[in-house]
Amino acid sequence: MRFPDGEFPIPVAQLEAESRWLEQFLTASVAEAIAVRPMLALPGWFVKRSDDKAAVYVFNPRNPRQLFMTGKVVLTPETMQRIAHQLDQLCRDVEARPPSPEAWPKQPGRNKAVAQKAR
């Protein structure tokens, strides 16, 4: 990847390992063979692909429709629902809560009152 301040290698081995893990997890979870392709999203960057058959698909997620709506339906709606459920179970294990007042940015003269009010 080339950025204005230098070139950085794409962590292909890590992305491939993660996609293999996810593929095995989903295949076992939904009892159906699920293919997973490694992708790297770069929001806000112009992405110029030099090889469409590269091991990792690098893209700007501004218009993800082109990635997922190719006209070729591979998964049934039921399979997509089972995959969505498994991903939801996998990713929703952290309870949302606001940071403690001690973690808030320091603002002179105001932090003490805010911290007391939050208790």
Image: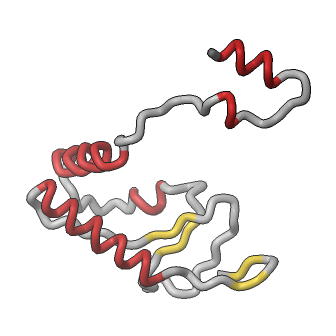
* Front residue (pair 83, 110): 110
Residue at the right extreme, as displayed: 108
- Quadrant where the N terminus is found in the figure: bottom right
Q: Position of residue 23 (x, y in %)?
A: 25, 68
* Front residue (pair 24, 60): 24
Q: Residue at x 25, y 69 (%)?
A: 35
Identify the image quadrant of residue 103: top right
Identify the image quadrant of residue 41: bottom right
- Quadrant where the C terminus is found in the figure: top right
Q: Position of residue 110 (x, y in %)?
A: 85, 22
Residue at the top extreme, as displayed: 117
Above or below, 15 relative to 63 = below
Residue at the left extreme, as displayed: 31
Q: Residue at x 90, y 29 (%)?
A: 108
Left or right of 99? Residue 88 is left
Q: Residue at x 39, y 57 (%)?
A: 69
Left or right of 101? Residue 95 is left
Q: Residue at x 64, y 72 (%)?
A: 47
Above or below, 79 relative to 25 = above
Above or below, 73 relative to 7 = above
Q: How is the image coloured?
A: secondary structure
Q: Position of residue 89 (x, y in %)?
A: 28, 44
Left or right of 102? Residue 25 is left
Identify the image quadrant of residue 73: bottom left
